[in-house]
């Protein structure tokens, strides 16, 4: 269970956890942190967030199967996010057909 400390002002600090890593993994984490100008703790936090989000995304299709047509702003945002991720994975798309001609209009001349 994470421990929660209080600051000198009395506000609660974020929960803290302790992790034991093999030396090789710790060195790799430190190298990643340095390459992104982050602290090792902050890099670990970012990587944990990404891992949790990835696992949650993998579990979402199972939850979506139970409720086939979710509605509301959260569902629309999730759908939009999934479509963007699919576009990113697809790489660059080629344009279809010949390019259309653009007509540039000159602004009217003032007297």
Image (cartoon, helix red, strand yellow):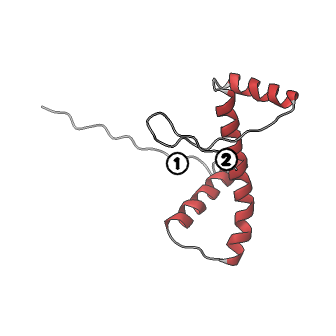
Residue 44 located left or right of residue 71? right
Report the number of numbered marks: 2
Q: Secondary structure at mark 2?
A: loop
Q: Which residue is mark 1?
A: 100
Residue that appears at 66% across and 39% down: 46
Q: Nearer the viewer, residue 100 or 87?
A: 87
Can residue 93 be seen here? The reply is: no
Q: Nearer the viewer, residue 79 or 6?
A: 6
Q: Secondary structure at mark 1?
A: loop
Coordinates of residue 77 in the picture (x, y in percent): 54, 60
Coordinates of residue 76 in the picture (x, y in percent): 54, 65
Quadrant in the rendering for residue 4: top right
Residue that extends furthest to the left in the rendered view of this protein? 111
Coordinates of residue 14 in the picture (x, y in percent): 57, 42
Q: How crowded is the residue under tag 2: few (<14 C-alpha within 10 Å), some, or many (20+)?
A: few
Against 34, residue 42 (above or below) is below
Residue that appears at 57% across and 59% down: 80
Q: Nearer the viewer, residue 43 or 81?
A: 43
Q: Which residue is mark 2?
A: 2
Q: Considering only order in the chain, which callout, 1 or 2, is on the residue closer to the N terminus?
A: 2
């Amino acid at each position: 269970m994470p421990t929660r400390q209080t600051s000198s002002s009395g506000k609660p600090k974020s929960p803290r956890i302790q992790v034991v890593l093999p030396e090789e993994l710790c060195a790799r984490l430190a190298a990643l942190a340095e390459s992104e100008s982050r602290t090792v703790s902050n890099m670990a936090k970012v990587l944990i967030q990404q891992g949790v989000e990835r696992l949650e995304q993998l579990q979402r299709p199972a939850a979506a199967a139970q409720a086939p047509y979710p509605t509301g702003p959260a569902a629309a945002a999730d759908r939009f996010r999934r479509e963007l991720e699919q576009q990113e994975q697809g790489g660059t798309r080629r344009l279809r057909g010949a390019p259309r001609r653009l007509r540039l209009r000159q602004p009217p001349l003032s007297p």
